[in-house]
Amino acid sequence: MTFDLFDNLDNSQDGYAPGSAPEPLAEGAVVLRGFARTQAPQLLDEIGDIAAKAPWRHMITPGGLGMSVAMTNCGQAGWVSDRTGYRYDPCDPLDGEPWPAMPAAFFDLATRAAAEAGFAGFAPDACLINQYEPGTRLSLHQDRDERDLRAPIVSVSLGLPAVFLFGGLRRADRPARIRLAHGDVVVWGGPSRLAFHGVAPLADGDHPLLGQKRINLTFRKAL
Ligand code: SIN
Ligand code: FE2
């Protein structure tokens, strides 16, 4: 196990343990603490480029409500919601253009995290990018708009810490509450692939790289 002084100082705050074993959440679900931390500045640069082409927006649910999370996408398909329902769309409905390509660094990170969690060969074709501000929440839901449910979901947390809610296969199952800090990665697949999950209202804070924001990347095999 190796760590430098900076990482060591951060240990107390974030539970960051470089090289530590995956932390089991449920069968098929793990947290990889700090897995994306060293790549985070590069990821944030790429996210800036993506949002310059496909801007953050608050999508409308089929019920007509605006989501509190701001979203964009990259990859061959992007997750979109509107009055007609949820779907993966190869183009951004705002301008009809294909979503920005998935940066190689994104694909590489997601594939390595999946392999670490026991899902070798993960080849994501879609990445949903969520942006949270203090007060933003994401209610319990399943990720089930993807065609092939054998592939896992890989979720990368950046910026302010959040409380991730990870439940069972029934909406009524009481979710575990897991603190996710900058650089933490969660992978869920196999028997946990359709687990209900969400994010508790984001607490205020000031992150050195992201200020009052949290950004989450979720990688999916959508097509
Ligand atoms: C999601 O469920 O799509 C995002 C989860 C998160 O922001 O941690
Ligand atoms: Fe989700």
Image (tube, helix red, strand yellow):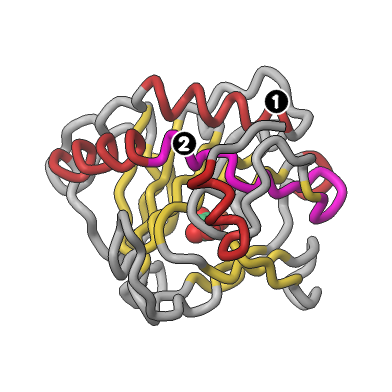
Q: Name the residue beneath numbered marker 1.
A: 115
- Please tell me whether residue 221 is drawn above or below residue 204 in the rendered image: above
Q: Residue furthest front?
A: 5
- Please tell me whether residue 76 is drawn above or below residue 11 in the rendered image: above
Q: Nearer the viewer, residue 117 or 88?
A: 117
Q: Nearer the viewer, residue 12 or 111?
A: 12
Which label number is shown at residue 96?
Answer: none
Residue at point 20%, 45% (across, down)? 51
Residue 102: quadrant of the picture: top left
Q: Where are the magenta residues, as a range?
A: 24-40
The answer to whether residue 201 is visible is yes
Q: CA distance from mark 2 to mark 1?
A: 18 Å
Nearer-N-terminus badge (2/1) = 2
- 169 relative position to 221: left or right: right
- Please tell me whether residue 33 is drawn above or below residue 176 in the rendered image: above
Amino acid type assigned to the residue bearing label 2 in the image: Thr
Residue at point 52%, 44% (across, down)? 5
Q: Nearer the viewer, residue 11 or 172?
A: 11
